[in-house]
Each structure stands twice: as structure tokens, then as C-alpha cells.
Amino acid sequence: MPIPPIIRLNRLTKRFRNQTAVDHVDLEIPEGICFGLLGPNGAGKTTTLEMIEGILEPTSGDILYRGKPRDRSFAEEIGIQLQQTTLLSFLTIRETLRVFGKLYRRSLDIDEILALCHLTEIQKQYNDRISGGQRQRLMLAIALINDPRLIFLDEPSTGLDPQARRHLWDIIDSIKAKKRTIILTTHSMEEAERLCDDIAIMDQGRVIARGDIPSLLAAHCFDAAGNRLCEPNLENVFLRLTGKQLRE
């Protein structure tokens, strides 16, 4: 039996004056997976994410959450890790989580969140004294404080060194093990291959490919007779579909 979609987009469109950023996107995201949204700069992936989150209003089209239009309860069931968020420098990590936890009717135990995000040993550190990797783990902890069913991660490992990146991936694996749904944007093919169960590739505001990594490799790196057209990896799939590097 197929997993029912937690998110369904029907002809989702966003225009800014004369520019169409997202162009009639139809997409279903099953519950309980890590879903990757990939595309070159300007492809429309962040705009799509922000419409699903409720930050941007669509020009037209529908967004359904578990088969119904989103209502006020939607905000209580999602967690968002943004690329850029200002943290108060005079608060410690623990105090920051306590402040954000008070914004929700339901929140997880702070000690549980600290342990999950590998922050227990530095919980008394002030926000202006933590490293980039520690800051990203704190941002993830904030996104998880309300025990969300649906988690949005926008470029979660940007700017991290390899060790910090892998620590973050281990945390995301722990979230996946709890059968939470994750919608992830990334410029890292390694990150997408490591974390994502299913992927949509966007270009010029449209979804141009969709599937799990093995099916995308089979469709775009081999011909109908099974002859290899290119080295089978996600980078080459992306290049063949868009003619661009992911970071372009």
C-alpha cells in the first residue's frame, strides 16, 4: 500500500511582477521520508519551500496538508530550520531553547533536545561563543522543539567543515528513524545522496525530474539497452537534465 502524501501541491504558482518563480508545480510528498528538493540558483526551490511553510502566499494553486487545506494547527506541526536566523547573544543555548519552547502549546523536554542535537555538554555556552557547527545544531534543535511531524531544512550544512557536516547528518538520521517527514533543500550532491529517500529536481520554476536515486540514475545515466551513458551519480543526472552544476 503506498504511503499517503503528507504534502500535495496542485498547480502551485508564484509570480513576482513579471517573473514566474514557480510555474504550475504538481508534487506529492509521502509521509515519513526525507524528501530532497534540488535545483540551480533561481530554480524556484526556496520559493516553493516558503509557500509550503506559509511564509509566502501563492499566486495560484493549492497546498494540501494530509489531504486538507492548511489551518492554524499547521504551524504547530512543523519545524523550520532557516539559513539565516538571529540568535540573542546574551542567551545560552539552553535558555534559547526554553524561549522558543514557550512559543508552542506542546514542546519536547529540553534535555531530550539537547541530547538529540549533541548540545548537552555546551548547553551553558552563550550564543555568540559557539562555532558554526554548534550553531547549526542549535538551529536544528529550535526547529525540533515542538516535536514537529514535518521538518523543513534549508541548506542545513552550508558552511560547515566535513566533520561538523557528518555530525549534523547523524542527527538527521536520528530524526528519520522517528518516521518524521523532512523536506530538504541542498546544494550538496553528497548530502542529497546520503540523506534523501526521494528527490525532485527543479529548473526554471518547474519540476523536471522526480524519483528515488536508483531510478534517477537508471533513467538518465543508462540507455534503453542498459549501456552506460555517463558515470552513474547524482551530479551527472543533474548536469544532463539542467546543463548546469548544482551551485550555478
Image (spheres, grey):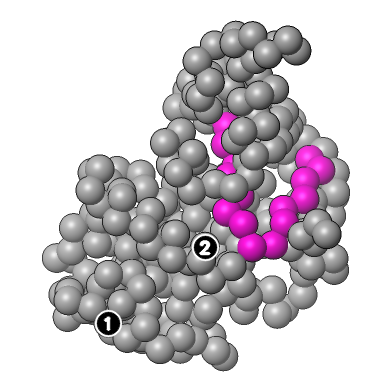
**How far separated are the C-alphas under marks 2 and 1?**
24 Å
Say which amino acid is labelled 2.
Lys
Residue 83 image offset from top left, x and y in percent: 42, 52
| Residue 38 is a magenta residue | yes
**Element type where label 1 sits in the image:** helix
**Element type where label 2 sits in the image:** helix
Categorize mark 2 by other alpha carbons within 10 Å: few (<14), some (14-19), many (20+): some
Q: Main secondary structure of the magenta part?
A: strand
The magenta span reads 25-39
Q: Nearer the viewer, residue 194 or 121?
A: 194
Of the numbered discs in the image, which one, if any, rests on residue 61? none
Say which amino acid is labelled 1.
Arg
| Residue 231, above or below 4 | above
| Res. 34 image quadrant | bottom right
Task: Tell me which numbered mark, 2 or 1, is placed earlier along the sequence.
Answer: 1
Residue 129 image offset from top left, x and y in percent: 14, 65
User: Marks 2 and 1: which is nearer the front?
Assistant: 2
Name the residue that disc number 1 marks. Answer: 94
**Residue occupying image coordinates x 57% and y 23%:** 238
Residue 243 seen anywhere in this rendered image of the structure: no
Q: Nearer the viewer, residue 71 or 246?
A: 246
